Image: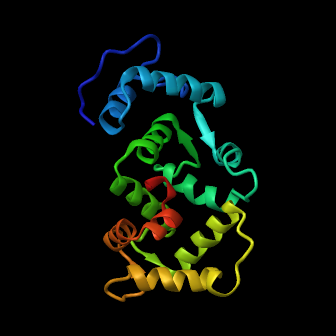
Amino acid sequence: MGAKKSKETSSHPKKSDPAELTQEEIQLLLQNTHFNQKQIEEWHSGFIKDCPKGKLDKKKFIDVYKQFYPHGKADKFCGHVFKTFDTDGSGEIDFVEFLIAISVTSQGDIKDKLRMAFNMYDIDKNGRIDKKEMEKIIEAIYDLLGEENRKGENSPPRRVLKIMAKLDKNNDGSLSPDEFINGCLNDEILRHLLAPNAC
């Protein structure tokens, strides 16, 4: 950001090695996560062990995620999660993106977690979640959880109608971040479905 040059550490003037953790990255993570420097360095060494090039691609990300949901199909859901974490749209998650996401999902306050869930569900990134986007997410969640019963009241379109009826306070057919966050805060069942890590 500033034009002031920092002291160049070792032989890496401009992070020529993506697996290296720079002082700037440590500072950024100290400011934007709940981790201390020792924890950041421990996370980094684990990340580099799994991703020696310092980047996590979508396939590897899905493979890791599948370990948590061995009975479901994680691909669709992981695609949405991956896009949310890949903040620069590079198709890969670097260590900084990874740790900020981990911090929010594991230690952030409930509103931060719900905001991240909203960002994940806002597929076209227009700041609103419409019925089509919500339906895709419900289908992805069903796949992830191995939910076979998708008939009647439990069908994704019916489920979405119920969710929208509860959360869409101004009846404009889409959810704003506030409608989504406040609705999930006020409805434990929806919060468990749409943002399980916020419970």
Task: Determine the residue positioned at 64% across, 24% down.
Answer: 49
**What residue occupies the far top of the structure in this picture?**
10
Image x and y of residue 167, in percent: 39, 79
Considering the image in quadrants, where does the C terminus appear?
bottom left
Above-or-below relation of 197 to 23:
below
In the image, 102: left or right of 35?
right
Instruction: Give the vertical position of 194 relative to 51 (above or below).
Output: below
Name the residue at 55% across, 22% down. 45
Q: Is residue 146 left or right of residue 116?
A: right
Q: Residue furthest front?
A: 188
| Residue 10, picture quadrant | top left
| Residue 62, image x, y percentages | 68, 49
Identified at 35% across, 70% down, the residue is 186
State how many labels appear.
0
- Picture layout, residue 40 above or below residue 161: above
Q: Position of residue 44 (x, y in %)?
A: 51, 26
Question: Where is the N terminus found, in terms of image quarters?
Answer: top left
Against 127, is 159 above or below? below
- Counting from the top left corner in percent of width and height, residue 84 is at 50, 55
For image coordinates 53% across by 66% down, the residue present is 193
| Visible residue check, residue 16 | no
Residue 173 is at least partly visible in this image? yes
- Between residues 128 and 113, which one lies in front from this camera angle? 113
State the colouring used for the structure image.
rainbow
